[in-house]
Amino acid sequence: DLWLFNDDGDDFLVVEISNDGGSTWDPVKTIAFLGLDNQWTRYTFIVNDHIASSSNMKMRFSIADEPNNSITEAAVDNFRVRRINCS
């Protein structure tokens, strides 16, 4: 679940994933604060839609105030990794 606030709408939360311990990163989602709702929002994705899974996976969540002229905040909660086996 993600919570995001940006008072002027020009900053984004970037979600990335790595399968090589963080040497390289692949973008999963870029999320903008639209100002319509100030609440927790659930996002899901399938790892193999972005990269091949490995035993050296990492996730990265980044946000920055670019340029430094606004209030920019983000939080992540209820982060889960599930493995689903289909027979």
Image: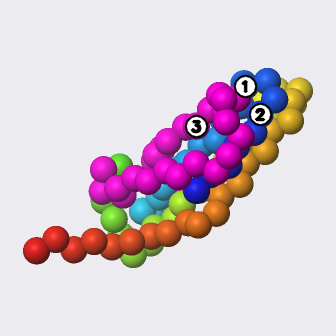
Badge 2 or badge 3: first in the primary sequence: 2
Coloration of the structure image: rainbow
Q: Amino acid at mark 1?
A: Gly
SS of the residue at dot 2? strand
Residue hosting label 3: 31
Which label sits on residue 6? 2
Which residue is drawn at the image coordinates 10% and 74% (left, top)?
Answer: 87
Q: Is residue 17 above or below residue 12?
A: below
Residue range highlighted in magenta: 22-49
Residue hosting label 1: 9
Badge 3 density bin: few <14, some 14–19, many ≥20, Cα 10 Å: some
Residue 7 x/y as whole percent: 81, 29
Rounded to the nearest angstrom, the CA distance separating label 2 from label 3 is 11 Å
User: Dots 1 and 2: beta carbons under 8 Å?
Assistant: yes
Which secondary structure type mostly characterizes the magenta part of the structure?
Answer: loop
Badge 2 density bin: few <14, some 14–19, many ≥20, Cα 10 Å: many
* Residue 51 visible: no
Which label sits on residue 37? none
User: Dots 1 and 3: beta carbons under 8 Å?
Assistant: no
Q: Is residue 71 left or right of residue 53?
A: right
Residue 38: in magenta span: yes
